[in-house]
Amino acid sequence: MSEVVPTGKAGLPAANAATASGTIAAQSEPDMKGWLLKWTNYLKGYQKRWFVLSKGVLSYYRNQAEMTHTCRGTISLHGALIHTVDSCTFVISNGGTQTFHIKAANEVERQSWVTALELAKAKAIRAMESDEEEEDTAANTIPSEELNLVVRELTVRLENLKTCYDLITKHGAALQRALSELESGEDLANKTKIVSERATLFRISSNAMINACSDYLQTAQTQGHKWSKMLQHERDQKLHLEEMVEQLARQHSHLEQAAHRHRPNAAASASDDEDNEFYDAQEEGGSVASQEDSSFILKIPVAHHRRNSNDATGSSSEGEEGNSETQQVLVVTDNLDNMDMTDRISVNSSQALTPTLSNNNQSTKVARRRRTRVPDKPNYPLNLWSIIKNCIGKDLSKIPMPVNFNEPLSMLQRLTEDFEYSEILDKAAQCKDTCEQLAYVTAFTVSSYSTTSNRTGKPFNPLLGETYECDRTDDLGWRCINEQVSHHPPMAAQYCESRGWRCWQEFTMTSKFRGKYIQIVPLGYAHVEFPATGNKFTWRKVTTTVHNIIVGKLWVDNHGDMEIYGEKSAKGVKCHLKYLPYSYFTRDTQRRVKGVVMDNSNQVKWVINGTWDSKIEIAPVTSTSGSAENPVYKTGNYKTAWSRRLPPTDCDKYYNFTLLACQLNEPEPNVAPTDSRLRPDQRLMEDGKWNESNGEKLRLEEKQRARRREREAEAEKAAAEGRPYPPYEPIWFSKQQDEGTDSLVHVFKGTYWDAKAKQEWSKCPDIF
């Protein structure tokens, strides 16, 4: 079926294997190329394509002739996941934006490609790290040396151009004299006429060339000193860049504060100066805000694009385009005076996380007492600009940042905070109506953002193989296990279970620092399933942006569209939710969230309304009017599906942690040796020993890089010997095909809690 033409290390004969490592990097030929079968979604089948692996990038074409002009798709390997499905099929995914499903002719060919891809990935990672080191070195180059080199090079080129000008003038005059002497001959009149015509053409061309060279020389000479002044000016501007950026950022911060002071409905946490402003208080348990807030217009997709193997990872297929058509709907509330508050399921801060007994009759003991706060955050001065000025445009997961920017929690623990309001899922599990159940699930997805309004610290990046367990079955009724399953790209897998529901997700993201703000775009999907009804719902988180990085008060905004759609028994039911971005000029409530729940016939059944930092209210649709293109939905009374519990009043002293966040890193016996609670740099930071924490952080990162280099060396050795080398496999999760799609996801094996009961941790790596 396919023909492999190896030119790199993975496909070299045994006789050439010994010299492969020294020649691949210098070759201009691809590492590997050949015919393979690729799954194309729009044809629903495998199609023969020509693949080329070169310089850490895998590309494919319809045929070899297309290589010179049309590339059908590429995927960079430096952050890719490579997984073998069966004896002939393998999958390449970069963790969220592209996925290739490829089939080889036989097992030998498949292994040859997988080995070559793993080696190319290792080389790409090393090259990326080398480029970053070269960038740092180039940033420290003395500007005057660069200026002198450029000036000397320009001077040499100008002298060469002047010499060419003199030679052309000299040879042109000699040619004209020779032609004049030739024309005086009587017997050569006919020949000289032809030569004279050609010489005339040459003379015209030469004069044009001489004039052009003369103009260029004159321009270069007259403008040379101007270029030197411009370069010197740029050098001076670079020296003062730090001061200019800080001044501009400070002015912008003052403008923001002034704008907030003149807007009575601005976010309360946007400026400290707003503490002295007073507004009319809302009635306790009232509606979202007013008739204006409860009635809104929302644009929803006409036809939801179903998630498949490519949608799950954002991959594009050949000749396939998404549907961008939308429908505008109007939501109107009938009665705002008689609010039904019987479904309020959140409690105030004094009752937050109070221990409760399990429904299990065998459980008679009271939940353990847990701590209510962490040590205060010390005040360490930090030159922020000196650290971040070389980080602009880079992925934050690849930047070694000091713990001064962190909070004493890992990303695995931060993911566990999604279940702070797990009682919403408990309520959803009791719902008989699928659309109402989805409305509560939607409120749960919004509640996970409640702590982001004032939590601006960066969680610790988990090490490969790091885990975190949180067993709260004795008081909250759920337990979860998280594991860092990939380092390039960074990816965490999570599984949480309760009596009435189970929830799992793969979390990976892209993040960029843009100088003034940081933008974080999640890529993985989250799922929740209710065994009693068989309903399953899936969603992806929205974008989070942290503003005022350099100067001013940090503040966070969540924005974008979220699609929550049903599967299994809930297939066809979906929710479209919109997080409105922050704006100075909008009349809408800041941090607003609004959406609708639709049944499998695309009829709106429930309305979602509220803010992601305060509360979410839901209301059933009682009647529909208007046209099919612009329908108007009237709702009944709103009821509160979620209300945020206020954090402790002095939480600003300890990273703005909620009560649950304070308990996540509390030491606990009998956990796995890879648990985040045992991470030394994180523990030292929590204890206020930041200098020692920075040292431990560097040690752990270097230890992780050393382990990766060992695996790369073993992979290269296995390739040279012609034997397969298995990639890294997680301990508590395994890669399996996602139900209903052909994409690969990390599925919980279900063995962790048994291993904890037996204290059998022999499979755990030594990462700390």
Image: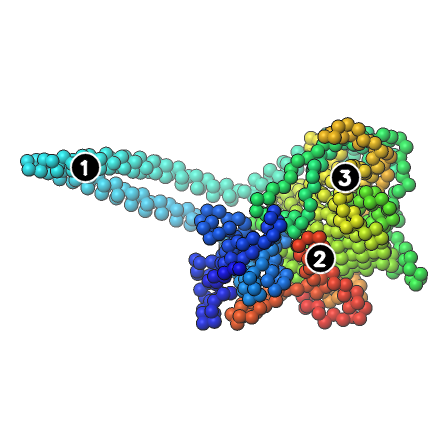
Check disc 3 and give the amino acid type: Ser
Is 120 above or below relative to 175? Answer: below
How crowded pointer 3 is (Cα within 10 Å; few <14, some 14-19, many 20+) is rated as few
Residue at x 70%, y 50% (from the top left corner): 525
Residue at x 51%, y 70% (from the top left corner): 720
Residue 423 appears anywhere in the view: no
The x and y percentages for residue 622 are 85, 33
Q: CA distance from mark 2 to mark 3?
A: 34 Å
The x and y percentages for residue 515 are 60, 44
Picture quadrant of residue 206: top left
Residue 751 versus residue 697: which sits nearer the camera? 751
Dots 1, 3 in contact, CB < 8 A: no
Check disc 1 and give the amino acid type: Ala
Secondary structure of the residue carrying tag 2 is strand
Q: Which numbered dot is residue 199? A: 1
Marked residue nearer the N-terminal end (1 or 3):
1
Q: Which residue is mark 3?
A: 601
Residue at the outermost left position: 186
The x and y percentages for residue 173 are 17, 38
Residue 129 versus residue 99: which sits nearer the camera? 99
